[in-house]
Image (cartoon, grey):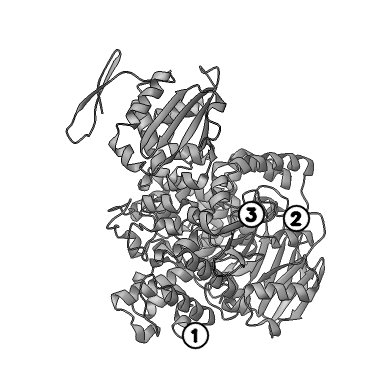
Amino acid sequence: MILQVFKGFVFKWYNYPNNILEVRMPAIFPSEEWLKGLEEKLNSDERYAEIAKNWEGDLFFFIQPEGSLKEQLTFYLDLWHGKCRKVEYQPQPDSYPTPTFILTATYTNITAILSGKLNPMTAMMTSKLKVKGSMGYMMRNVPTVLDFVRVAQDVTTEIL
Amino acid sequence: MQPILKIDLSTGATEEYRIPEKWEKDFLGGASLAARILYEYLTPDLDPLSPDSPLLFLTGPMTGTSGPTTGRFVICGKSPATGLWAESNIGGFWGPELRAAGYDGLWITGKASEPVYVWLNGSRVEVRNAAHLMGMNTYTTQDKVKEEVGVKSARVCVIGQAGEKQVLFASIMCDHGRMAGRTGMGAVMGSKNLKAVAVRGINEIPVFDMAKYKKLRSESNRKLHDDNEAKVIREVGTGGAANYAEYLGAMPVKYYSRGSFPEVDNVSGAKMTDTILVGRSACQGCVIACGRVVKLPKDATKRKGPEHETMVGFGANLLNDNLEAIVDLGELCDRYGMDTISASNTIGLAFHLYEKGIITKEDTGIELKWGDVDAIEELVRLIGSREGIGDLLAQGSKRFGAHFGAEEEAVQVNGLEVAYHDPRGVSGMAISYATSPRGACHNQSDYFFVDWGHSNEELGIEFFSRHAQAEKAANVARHQDWRSVDNAIVMCIFANVEPKEKVELINAACGLDWTVADMMKFGERSWNLKRAINNRMGLTRANDKLPKALLTPFPDGGSEGFVPDIEAMLIAYYQHRGWDLETGKPAREKLIELGLEDVAEDLWG
């Protein structure tokens, strides 16, 4: 639950066992800071660590230009056993030649997912989020995918 | 439209039945047109297994046109299991072959005095003796008939021993394991002494505007090929969602009594892909290819692999996590020619009653322990041959339960066993099962997809929580109307073809100028017509209900504690539908609005 939003800072109250008040820098999507914030959160979130403990695979996000986004954006994340080993903002495509998954969506759809307006399963089932990679692996790990989205939503304080 | 070939097996007479022009437009084809044609013949007194009972094989206006997943047809009549409207949708290549022979349908009446099969070679019809085929399984029968007619490319629809013996959930098979499984159409075929129908056609299949249609179908097939759901189904089969369904508590476990099955991955589509899958198979013109081809370690034979329903029915439902055994059990049902959903569900009831002490080894002849593959296999064999306890099980779960004074334990609606999508995990299925015109069916509205997230803005099918209650009733109704379109044209429900695309395909194929709204109105008309057929045969609001098990909260799993509020759902549903709250009949005004004036007159006087 967001308690209060100040310029430049966001305070969130999480249901951690000891009710720690977390203070975090803003994460404006899309930006390199947002991606770093996501990496940090993925590596500190206990629920994600548990649900994604069997996940092995890196992925590219291709965000197709639309509206205020004029050029394609690319994010790279290396997710492994409930942790995020690496992120890279706008990597060269050949830097990681064999990603486990490539996820592609328009800017409108990706921001709709991040703001909670578009259910991530709806996005996948209606191909608003296109998936390239092992569909069997994806279907075995839907809870991990959904929790990844929860974490991404959680770190997003503002969408451009 | 092309004519329907009518064959009276009692006399051997044949005639070409021409569909009234108005019906072509108002009912198109498939299940909707079948409902219109059969409306006057499906009476309360009609014994579904009597010579008077009609058996109608009907294609859709796009069958065989290589449109998106349009290689299908439907088999309709009166169900011996439910005593209500029967329709069973089937893929393969037989339907396209029938259209290429110059017919859009085959209408069987009467009863042959001895076992026969029909050989339709173009417009030439022969009714041949089939005494020597009796007792043969479905695969052998297909091979034998093809050999006899001497045309390798002939397509053959057959029944197995279950159909011959009129098991109430006997199916009709064509091609490599494609099944019209539900509602017992195989028993109706068996009651007519009809073992098989072989077809060969060489004509071009008619399309109103082929140039336009070709362009539309290319685009549609291209999009469908790259669709996420299609990719899942192609790669891991319909069993690909097993892990997710189990996670949600939407997978029936131990005859619908448990909410979780930790061994689910052993019996999932992903596991099958990793271990025994060696190929995929598709119906005519289909770019999805949901069919599985597997090889078991025990031999080098390529076999049909199970789809979702068979995997859950003979898997989690019976606490069996042996995937290879499920392959065998599915194949055994296919060879006997019986529906794997009803067979596994009814066997599940036997295990359930055995555990409760309602039946004992004295009744069954064998010990029934959950997960005992040998016992399951023995029951399948007994059902297929109608021997011992199998004779009772062959009558389906409702009658089996009633025989032992425990009908309320049977997980069925109106005599059709519930499919393997639990409404405690995906609540929209509560309405789907309770109001489906053919009993607890998941193909009249596979609403579980919507509850997982597959909404459709253009049709007003919104996304509601999977545990939402009456607020989703209208949404389910819209989804039923949408699926009624698919069941008419006859398009596979796995095909994500957007409404605008679909209506353009229909318009090009049929020479219509429908809008999406017109198409949905058509779907609503079809749904109400089937409802009216059932009302005429005695169905009332009291029939719209769920079995006790589905209204009992799960003790564990992803849907622990939840039950659908079926009464509130039904009230909201009736109100949206314009159905009478007392009788459950579509209101006179609704029927007239849908252009069903004669039906309104029949129902309301």
The disc label shown at residue B387, or none: 1
Quarter of the N terminus of chain B within the rendering: bottom right
Check contact, mark 2 vs mark 1: CB within 8 A. Answer: no
Placement of A3 over or under B237, stated as above or below = above
Residue indicated by mark 2: B1
Answer few, some or many: residues within 10 Å of disc 1's Cα (few below 14, many 20 plus, some between 14 and 19): some
Left or right: B45 in relation to B125: left
Left or right: B479 in relation to B217: left
Answer few, some or many: residues within 10 Å of disc 3's Cα (few below 14, many 20 plus, some between 14 and 19): many
Query: Where does residue B369 sit, x and y in percent of width and height?
Result: 35, 74
Residue indicated by mark 3: B490
In the foreground, B581 or B526: B526
Residue at the spot x=36%, y=71% of the render? B370
Residue at the spot x=35%, y=42% of the render? A53
Distance of label 2 from label 1 (alpha carbons)? 45 Å
Q: Three-letter amino acid code at disc 2?
A: Met
Question: Considering the numbered disc 1 on the image, is that residue within a helix, a strand or a loop?
Answer: loop
- Disc 1 sits on a residue from what chain? B
